[in-house]
């Protein structure tokens, strides 16, 4: 099936923008709604990409967006919410109600193809609100049997504008020692370009319909190793001191009030109670067309070097991608 026009909801975000760029490069026409067009100006220059301001939580707007397209990719997600059981109202709105509205709008307009970004570890039994709400979002979509649905569950995603490696590199800028909880939590970071390629390859491949894919990188790291890596690659190697869970939650609670929005939350700490990794025998599904998973060591130093104030040379190299 050749899709003519793809609606990428959340297409202005970290992962979404890579998906949009790949779709555009393959000649698709792409529609990207955003709350602020300014936020998506990097997409405006791409051929075949239309960026419009819209409120995706408003049913009429969402319906009118879906009506213009024949496939939908949902990349909307948040990391923080007010608290609640089994999750807070912000997670409920973004991770559960929005997918429900998308599915209902697609049914109204007879659009069947949907790619949805969930998260590794999503489960109604998970220790965090984030992962419980992601599980309910998946459940809402799986219940819509008419949808040609593909769900992706990435581990933490790294890439130039990520909010994970960059966060620790930035903290190292201000703090001589990093004091962190969950230092032994395990992750299997996956490169943003690999995630985007998997999504774009899946779009028109019927073998991926009704399938749910874990997306992980080639190697497992502890949080301590990742933070050490981010600090060193940005030119500020730091000593990392582990905190017991009670103190880590207290620290996260304080960081929930950081100016400009939470830097970390108690819910993030809860997410780390379970390893964010694939089973040992996991392999990237061949139909996703990723021949070689990109190692963190290959790409992360390129963009983390940009945060190194002393290394003008590194900055030039990073820009030249050498
Ligand atoms: N990044 C990771 O490491 C990672 C790991 C696992 C799973 N995921 C999942 O992958 C998806 C994409 O993640 P991402 O890192 O690309 O997210 P992101 O950079 O935060 O982008 C989220 C997008 O959602 C849009 N959005 C619309 N309404 C929103 C609202 N009320 N609150 C927040 N955002 C809103 C934003 O668009 P505007 O601001 O332009 O309106 C933004 O482009 C999410 O579902 C996420 O849970 C990400």
Image (cartoon, rainbow, N blue to C red):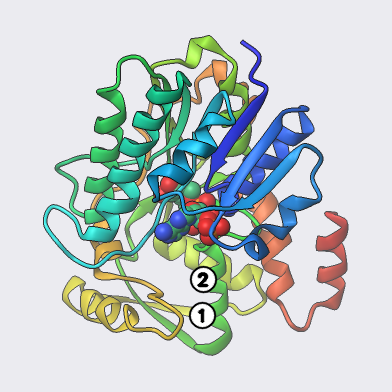
Near-viewer residue (162 or 22): 22
Please give left or right for residue 265 compared with residue 247 in the image. right
Is 311 located above or below residue 321 in the figure? below
The crowding category of the residue bearing disc 2, from other C-alpha atoms within 10 Å (few below 14, some 14 to 19, many at least 20), is some
Position in image of residue 208 (x %, y %): 48, 16
Identify residue for label 1: 171
Would the CB of label 2 be found within 8 Å of ligand 1? no
Farthest residue, direction front:
60
Near-viewer residue (221 or 139): 139
Q: Residue at x 50, y 10 (%)?
A: 207
Is 177 located above or below residue 207 in the figure? below
Position in image of residue 134 (x %, y %): 30, 44
Q: Residue at x 62, y 21 (%)?
A: 289
Q: Residue at x 39, y 16 (%)?
A: 210
Would the CB of label 1 be found within 8 Å of ligand 1? no
The crowding category of the residue bearing disc 1, from other C-alpha atoms within 10 Å (few below 14, some 14 to 19, many at least 20), is some
Q: State the mark number for residue 49.
A: none
Q: Quadrant of residue 160?
A: bottom right
Position in image of residue 73 (x %, y %): 52, 34
Please give left or right for residue 127 compared with residue 32 in the image. left
Identify residue for label 2: 167
Q: Which quadrant would the N terminus be assigned to in this image? A: top right
Describe the element under mark 1 as helix, strand or loop: helix
Q: Quadrant of residue 322?
A: bottom right
Near-viewer residue (191 or 93): 93
Tag 1–tag 2 contact (CB < 8 Å): yes
Describe the element under mark 2 as helix, strand or loop: helix
Q: Quadrant of residue 255?
A: bottom left
């Amino acid at each position: 099936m050749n899709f003519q026009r793809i609606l990428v909801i959340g297409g202005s975000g970290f992962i979404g923008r890579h998906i949009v760029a790949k779709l555009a490069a393959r000649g698709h026409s792409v529609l990207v709604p955003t709350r602020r067009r300014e936020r998506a100006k990097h997409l405006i220059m791409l051929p075949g990409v239309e960026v419009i301001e819209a409120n995706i939580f408003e049913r009429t707007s969402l319906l009118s967006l879906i009506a213009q397209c024949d496939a939908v990719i949902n990349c909307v997600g948040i990391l923080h919410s007010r608290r609640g059981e089994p999750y807070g109202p912000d997670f409920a709105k973004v991770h559960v109600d929005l997918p429900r509205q998308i599915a209902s709008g697609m049914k109204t307009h007879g659009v069947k193809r949907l790619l949805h970004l969930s998260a590794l570890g999503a489960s109604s039994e998970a220790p965090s609100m984030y992962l419980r709400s992601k599980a309910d979002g998946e459940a809402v979509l799986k219940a819509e049997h008419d949808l040609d649905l593909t769900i992706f569950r990435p581990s933490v995603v790294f890439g130039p504008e990520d909010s994970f490696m960059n966060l620790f590199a930035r903290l190292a800028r201000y703090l001589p020692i990093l004091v962190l909880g969950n230092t032994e939590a395990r992750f299997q970071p996956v490169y943003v370009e690999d995630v985007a390629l998997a999504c774009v390859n899946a779009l028109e491949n019927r073998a991926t319909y009704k399938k749910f894919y874990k997306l992980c990188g080639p190697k497992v790291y502890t949080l301590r190793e990742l933070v050490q890596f981010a600090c060193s690659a940005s030119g500020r190697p730091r000593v990392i001191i582990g905190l017991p869970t009670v103190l880590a939650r207290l620290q996260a609670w304080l960081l929930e009030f950081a100016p400009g929005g939470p830097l970390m939350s108690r819910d993030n700490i809860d997410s780390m109670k379970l390893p964010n990794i694939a089973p040992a025998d996991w392999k990237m599904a061949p139909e996703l067309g990723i021949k070689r998973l990109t190692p963190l060591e290959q790409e992360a130093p390129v963009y983390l070097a940009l945060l190194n104030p002393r290394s003008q040379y590194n900055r030039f190299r990073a820009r030249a991608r050498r």
